[in-house]
Image (cartoon, rainbow, N blue to C red):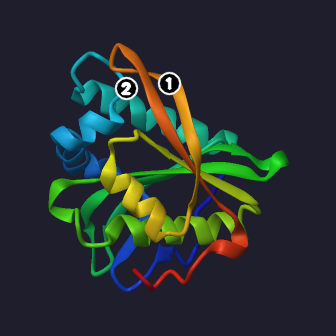
Amino acid sequence: MIVPPPSGLVDDVVALRLWLPSDFAQRFAGFRDPQCLEFSWPLVEEFTEDHLRRRFVQEEAERVRGEAINLAIVDAADSQRVWGGASIYDVESNEGRAAVGYWLSAPARGRGIASRAVRLLARWAFTDLTIMRLALTCAPDNLASRRVAERCDFVEEGLMRSHTPFQGRRRDTLLFSLLPNELRPVTSS
């Protein structure tokens, strides 16, 4: 089971916490944004509230099995204001590796929030989860995610051609990685 630290994952701007049932409306509205759907929704069918309800159940099962943890990115001053989501997933504890993912609602973009969330997650993964390699992937045309990877000192390793099924076709994926000694302080943006 993956359990967030009791002191939380927080800096002076963002906090990461487990999703709450009361977050449902904000999570649905934020992820339903066209930019989120363009880069993060892999299915051809329309994203619905039912998809999100099933996702809540699936995420808890993954957390209990130690495979992933999905967290709400919230305002550090108001934990009820949801800015997006972040996760550590594809956790391979015995091999010391995992991946990080994130999305932001439109009002939260362009403010360094994703970079702060990724740094908080990376530090926690390296120290508490004993991860030794953290991967970050995105579509080559997802410039915002590429900038987050660069700001967080992830190293671009290459292009995986026709890597994953996505919205009825196959999509190329850029692969980035971060090692524990490459992580900058959480408070920098």
Identified by mark 2, the residue type is: Pro
Q: Kindly identify the residue that appears in the image at 26 percent across and 61 percent down.
A: 83
Viewer-proximal residue among 184 and 4: 184
Q: Which of the two marks, 1 or 2, is nearer to us in this view?
A: 1
Q: Tag count in the figure? A: 2
Viewer-proximal residue among 158 and 123: 158
- Indicate the quadrant containing the C terminus: top left, top right, bottom left or bottom right: bottom left
Q: CA distance from mark 1 to mark 2?
A: 9 Å
Q: Kindly identify the residue that appears in the image at 48 percent across and 36 percent down.
A: 173
Q: Is residue 60 above or below residue 167?
A: below
- The kind of secondary structure element at disc 2 is loop
Give left or right: position of 64 versus 94. Answer: left
Q: Residue furthest right?
A: 94
Dot 1 and dot 2 residues touching (CB under 8 Å): yes
Give left or right: position of 124 versus 73. Answer: right
Q: Is residue 17 visible?
A: yes
- The residue that label 1 is drawn on is 164
Q: Kindly identify the residue that appears in the image at 17 percent across and 44 percent down.
A: 29
In the rendering, at what x and y percent does residue 18 appear? 45, 57
In the rendering, at what x and y percent does residue 8 appear? 51, 74
Q: Is residue 95 above or below residue 165?
A: below
Give left or right: position of 182 versus 139. Answer: right
In the rendering, at what x and y percent does residue 37 appear? 25, 35
Q: Residues within 10 Å of mark 2 (few under 14, many from 20)?
A: some
- The residue that label 2 is drawn on is 42
Q: Is residue 72 visible?
A: no
Q: Residues within 10 Å of mark 1 (few under 14, many from 20)?
A: few
Residue 63, by quadrant, is top right
Residue 151, by quadrant, is bottom left
Say whether disc 1 or disc 2 marks the residue closer to the N-terminus: 2
